[in-house]
Amino acid sequence: MGFDTLGLSEAVLEAITESGYENPTPIQAQAIPLILEGRDVIGASQTGTGKTAAFALPALSKLTPMGKPQILVLEPTRELAHQVAEQFEKYGKHTGLKVALLFGGVGFGDQLKALQNGADIVVATPGRLVDHFYRATMRFNEVKILILDEVDRMLDMGFLP
């Protein structure tokens, strides 16, 4: 079964082909159709099995550019946030959707610009997201998809609800 049988958008399929992928991994084959249906998914799989693509590909396929955050991805560390933002950019390069990366330890300037320039996808660490919330620099009213990646690590690190 190829990616073209999963119901992904043409723009996302083009990026997948350019990336050299032909067939989905088991986690992708199971998760993608459910996410496209709008169902909630809890996925667990070994490192290197394509978990990021399992949630990024259908999320990108469901949206059109609005210039407001529609996808919010929470990551436990800035390194993971950076990696995931790069994957969203790679898979979404033909969609017109813009990505903003929010993490602590750096100034707000570039991150604020990314939000103001019409980010459709926000990949953030919890602490910096809370900072933007309290400063009212990010609105959540158009968020349609929430992805909690590596949530076990976030809880281990003390990001409690």
Image: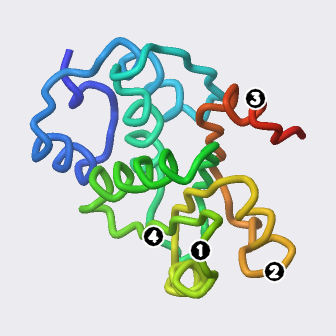
Q: Residue 12's spot in the image, x, y percent?
A: 27, 48
Pick the front one: 6 or 99? 99
Q: CA distance from mark 3 to mark 2?
A: 28 Å
With respect to residue 5, does 122 lie above or below?
below
Amino acid type, label 4: Pro
Q: Residue 135's spot in the image, x, y percent?
A: 82, 81
Amino acid type, label 2: Ala
Q: CA distance from mark 3 to mark 1?
A: 23 Å
With respect to residue 30, does 9 lie above or below?
below
- Is 37 positioned to the left or the right of 54 in the image? right
Image quadrant assignment for residue 56? top left
- Report the mark closest to the observer, 2 or 1: 1
- Colour convention of the picture: rainbow
Circles 3 and 1: CB atoms closer than 8 Å = no
Disc marking residue 106: 1
In the rendered image, which residue does mark 2 sit on? 136
In the rendered image, which residue does mark 3 sit on? 156
Residue at screen point 47% across, 14% down: 45
Image quadrant assignment for residue 95? bottom left
